[in-house]
Amino acid sequence: MKIYNMVERGTDGFYHPENEEQIIALIKKAHDEKHQIRVRGAAHSIAWAIYTDPGEGFPNVPNTVSEQSPPKGPNINIMLDNFRKMHWLDEEKGIVEAEAGIHLGKDPLDPTETSMLKESLLYQAHQKGWTLNDLGGITHQTVSGFLMTGSSGGTLMYSLDENLLAFRIVDGTGHAEWIEKDKHQELFNAAALSLGLFGVITKVRLQLTKEFCIYGEEITYDIGPKCPIDLFGDGNKKTPDLATFLKDTPYSRILWWPQKQVNRIMIWMAIRGERLPVFSPFPYHEFEKKKFNTQLEELAAAVLFTTLANKGFVNIWSKLKKDFTQFKTNLSKRRGITSEGKPRKRWFVPFCADIIFKLFFFPAVLFFSIFPGVLVWMYPHIIDILEPLSGKEGGKSFIDYVWRSLPMDNAADDILMGTEFTELWIPVQYTTKVMQLLKYQFDEKGFEASGYYATELYTGIKSELWLSPSYQTDTFRVDFFWYINNPGNPAAKDGYFSQFWELLREHKIPFRLHWGKFLPEYNYKEWVEYFREQYPRWDDFMKLRAERDPQNIFLTSYWRRHLFGEE
């Protein structure tokens, strides 16, 4: 009987190793006993892409984002919450080694709201005058989870790949090694975005960028003659076409509300700049500046989108239960420290607020569940309130450090504003054609095609990583949003997302998909062949993957379906 230097499984279902030796022991156990083993980060990807399969006789977890618990059974799910240190190798040159479980920014599950921020990679780097070239819309991901799924922000000028020097990985046999960009280029390009299928990342070595500030504005316009972007045409001297705007704007993202009588875009754009001699930051705020008002605005949005998409009062109200719970939990977070140094608990105000707003929303949900057409009629006017057009005074300006305001969606609560999506990466030269196709789709099919949510438009700079959706090409990215309380499976054959995948295939427009978001859950063999056509190094990746994981301990049934077409 083999004895492993094991850590015990926690009551939360995860193993929490404290050092690399314990990770190696867990991998060897999985290898010898033919168990699956996976590592979760911040659970920002869909659950089946993160976790192992459940044990025989156990149900799988829901395939949603922010699923915090692993499936039950003998398979091994690891959380690297003991791997959050950062070590400066060369402070003058900005070279650091970060443990794989460190968060880029604040962990939203942190009850103290501050300790995890101070321990985050971006905050610690900021204290020394360093940062990363680019950031996504949120920063509560772990550094390894962010890299392994190919996440990135919206820019065609700055690449996060430039910050990555090396990573330490333990493969499927328990062998640990550093893979360095300069020394192992082919293996580096294969494994740096490998979905956790090459092994467990334990450390990442980064060449940070000298810290810069961002200067930006957010403006909202009707899509018409006064719109500053020609969204569906070739543009002119005064108004650029969309592709030109995206290429010429250092950092950008657009939220497009294509519904009739709404038909507007919210443009977020920013440039780099030096810190001024007298610098007074004015951070970006996606919602209200006051936290209570932000929570209330997000709760109202949760009620709106849940009521619009579902039928029956009992069904709607039951789905809103977790939103009210989250609202109450958020209000309960501490405001100060007790004399014993513990977080101060608040219960009276959250308790009262929960009761008040349940009583407030109850009759509204009841009425609109009986008369849903009234809410649909009111929808454009509600969006006018939630996303008002920019007036003569202009948009929402901001000046701030990059780590705090470039991630523009950090304030969005993962439950109240639970957003799932499929993300299409399309060669940038197809931008105008894609926008014209989407406009036609939305105009012809109305809410059936557009839903009641926004669609996100931005970019992805080309990469040399083999499975990057922007491998060797600059891309135009389209995120089709799906509110988490919506009914049905959006990735199914007749699901909401399939219309967009099939639309582009029908018109022979090549695209790739973000690996951590929804992939097609139908015709698996057909889709694998399609993906193989889109990724020139696909077969090379699979060959290397098999060498690094000979017992397939990292390969779950989810990834067997999507990488090999196995039903």
Image (cartoon, grey):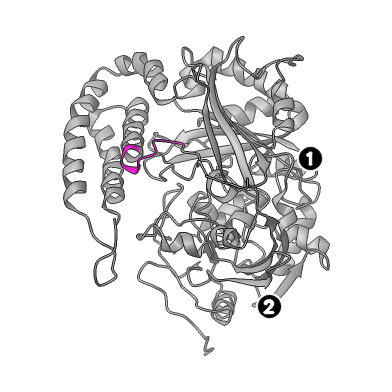
Q: Quadrant of residue 300?
A: top left
Q: Is residue 219 magenta?
A: no
Q: Nearer the viewer, mark 1 or mark 2?
A: 1
Residue 206: in sight, yes or no?
Answer: yes
| Drawn side of residue 55 relative to residue 554, left or right | left
Residue for point 32% across, 15% down: 373
| Drawn side of residue 274 relative to residue 522, left or right | right
Depth order, front residue of 190/548: 190
Q: Position of residue 556 (x, y in %)?
A: 56, 59
Residue for point 72% across, 72% down: 178
Q: Position of residue 32 (x, y in %)?
A: 58, 79
> Where does label 1 land, which residue?
473
> Where does label 2 land, which residue?
175
Helix, strand or loop for disc 1: loop
Depth order, front residue of 13/167: 167
Height in image: 93 above or below 508? Answer: below
